[in-house]
Amino acid sequence: MSQTEPLTRIASVMATIRQRIEAGSLPVGSKLPSVRAFAGAIQSSVSTVVEAYNLLVAEGMIVSRPGSGFFVAPQVIPLKLSSAGPKADRAIDPLWISRQSLEADDKVLKPGCGWLPASWMPEQSVRKALRTVSKAGVDSLSSYSSLLGLPALRHLVSRRLSEKGVEASPDQIILTDSGTQAIDLLCRYLLKPGDTVLVDDPCYFNFQALLRAHRINMVGVRYTPTGPDIDAFARIVVETGPRLYITNSGVHNPTGAILAPAIAHRVLKIADQHDLVIIEDDIFADFEHTSAPRLAGFDGLDRVAQIGSFSKTLSASVRCGFIAARPEWIEGLIDLKIATMFGGARLNEEVVYAALSDGGYRRHTDALRVKLERARRDVGDRLRALSIVQWTEPRAGMFLWCELPEGAESADLTRKALASGIVLAPGNAFSVAQNAASFMRFNVAQTDSRTIEKLSQLLRLR
Amino acid sequence: MSQTEPLTRIASVMATIRQRIEAGSLPVGSKLPSVRAFAGAIQSSVSTVVEAYNLLVAEGMIVSRPGSGFFVAPQVIPLKLSSAGPKADRAIDPLWISRQSLEADDKVLKPGCGWLPASWMPEQSVRKALRTVSKAGVDSLSSYSSLLGLPALRHLVSRRLSEKGVEASPDQIILTDSGTQAIDLLCRYLLKPGDTVLVDDPCYFNFQALLRAHRINMVGVRYTPTGPDIDAFARIVVETGPRLYITNSGVHNPTGAILAPAIAHRVLKIADQHDLVIIEDDIFADFEHTSAPRLAGFDGLDRVAQIGSFSKTLSASVRCGFIAARPEWIEGLIDLKIATMFGGARLNEEVVYAALSDGGYRRHTDALRVKLERARRDVGDRLRALSIVQWTEPRAGMFLWCELPEGAESADLTRKALASGIVLAPGNAFSVAQNAASFMRFNVAQTDSRTIEKLSQLLRLR
């Protein structure tokens, strides 16, 4: 036996306890298992557990009360999202891409970023909406919104959802500060620390960051070009007993895949059998020419809640999102909305309503879809010339999920690219299982000739 | 022994288990203690615990696996804030006043509400700011804000804090979607489910709702006209080992009390000794003629974080708040901000900046303070004529915390008033210990002659 083995075992025992404290299953003030009981439970030696407990006392994480045992200490242990996961490699951290993209100045190229350049957004619709609202009644300018949010906007959202096959009355729609905040509110309502949640692998990286903030165990299900691998989905549901499945089925992020009706049907059947609820994130709805199947549409908002926002096609500056959910959930969601954000953001709701009820927005999205289709084709061709190959051919949206040439590693390429002023989106940022190291997500609206040229240089330098 | 006693004991055992499941100390899938062990631990009979377990199985909250025991069931148990507390009496629920106030139409009188009437707000400053922003650059209209939020607004907040004796560089300031959301973000960063938090008794009712959403144990400390009862504070800190104390020391809600420097000093000394962190909610800052002491100022943002917003004196429609905190907390807070709300609400930040950097806002708040002073005196006099007596004489703000005439009960009066179209704020909504049944908070800007007349009628009808 080498010298380092006992140390590794002690560290592993410490990590187990730390994790239980962070997940809340050992709350502050609670008594730890006795050294002997814990050693038995984890099949370790008593001396290893003694040493681990003593080190945790030294760290201030637990306290020893002679004669009565060890207790979780009351000191502040801030929730650290970027080191809470299994790996702390900064290039594949789920928050890395968001931070780099949000902080980048105009000189930085951002093919990894998750939104359109400002020049692709309907700026004039927003200007016009601001002028309209500047002349509105005093309540529009000075008062909180109502509990559910501006009635006119909820009616408009209800009509738009109906066009996508999702029937939700305005009373089933709650406006929120953003799409992310809509998911956050649902997680607060539906989940408890320590619950298990299914995500797609790959999935939008911020689902992972958000679920970590809720102290949730994540399990990934392999995604295919027609939806989740349904046999794996069925097996994993039985094995891990998740409460919730979170996905975006309209235009899947990062793959651009489209959910097949038969898969949607089977997902809902499994969900029914195992009392699984589903959050369907549909923020890319306005990128579609024709609507792909929606879980929320098939299910009739029974066990599926749908969320949406206007950040991707109207404005990321005017934050506003919504939840469409079954009537029985609405009162509880309103209570949580008041407790955690108080009144609704009326100004944003008024501006979004003014912009969306104007013909200009629909003309803009019609033109945008054509422009994105051309960009997907052009960028796809140019990436292929660098042996960067599309995993599937998306019918809508701004993302291409691509496999790098043999031997290229996406986190490594990402670090090198950042040194040259390019923000990339490496595959493993999207993968709970960390099995997408050879993949990369490209935003076709942010991938210009300079980006392709730099990528080409970096790939040649390998 | 009466017939009902065993039933009461069974219900009490069920409540204990339900509470542990909701608080996360019994996570989903975890095994419950054996019937015998649990009966011993809570000094109950085995048959009572057997019955309680069986009823919980029938409710679907736990499952029985023959041969291995009872386990917490994986079904969805939505977090219900309005029944999670010790009492479900709708008139004293911490969310009741918020819901009634936010949902009330123009015909309802709202002396219990926590904000000024729209007609008292600087509507023209907001209109002008909207016109200014409608002509701003494309990024102001279309892009997310930066990680910390609009630099110009953070510089302005930094200067305003400095005027109140709180030194915070713009890099120590994070903009949020609202003051409530600023507190929520800090709670996420600093707390874990099951932690204990100190609040003032009485305190702003939404602190209680927010802390329930975080599955926190609350302990109240009696508030006096010069701050918390410092001997009780010291004793309760030792007895309950809280992580955090949350208060608003500028203009205390609901009492209007002003923190005395000597009390502030002792609070900070106790906090130092027991590694307690403090959130100081300072959203009423602009109501003050001269600044009262701030914990954040005395402490230099070491263990105190201060939050603020512009909802009370600029606009409740333009949601924007901020956190000022020690530099070491900023990166972790940014991670949580991205995970739970993604990009910042740039439009709101731009509108607040435009409004605040215009001279009109300062003139408005100067005039508002005079107007509120007069209203406090007038309404105070008229309430006194009904034998409704002020607990202290506030030097700033819109609230009077008053004791009702002998024999009047505030929850009862509140229910009757609602039937007459008046929303009141009964004392126990502010009290963790539920010992403010004879108190009521009045908003002087919302208490007009009709309100006084109706109150007079209701009190005579007793």
Image (tube, coloured by chain):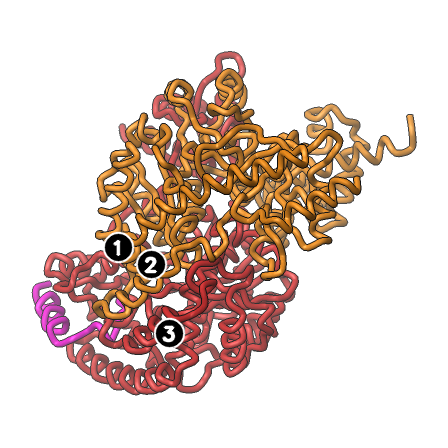
Chain colours: A orange, B red
Identify the residue under disc 3: B132
Label 3 with label 1: CB-CB less than 8 Å: no
Asked whether B182 or A292 is in front, the reply is: A292
Q: What residue is disc 1 on?
A: A358
CA gap, disc 1 to disc 2? 8 Å
- In front here: B137 or B195? B137
Q: Name the residue under label 2.
A: A125
Query: Residue B392's quadrant in the figure?
Result: bottom left
Q: What element carries label 1?
A: loop
Same chain for mark 3 and mark 2? The answer is no
Q: Main secondary structure of the magenta part?
A: helix
For the point 21% across and 61% down, the residue is B409
Residue B339 included in the magenta stretch of the image: no
- How far apart marks 3 and 1 lie (CA) works out to 21 Å
Range of magenta residues: B440-462
Image coords of residue A161 (percent x, y): 29, 39
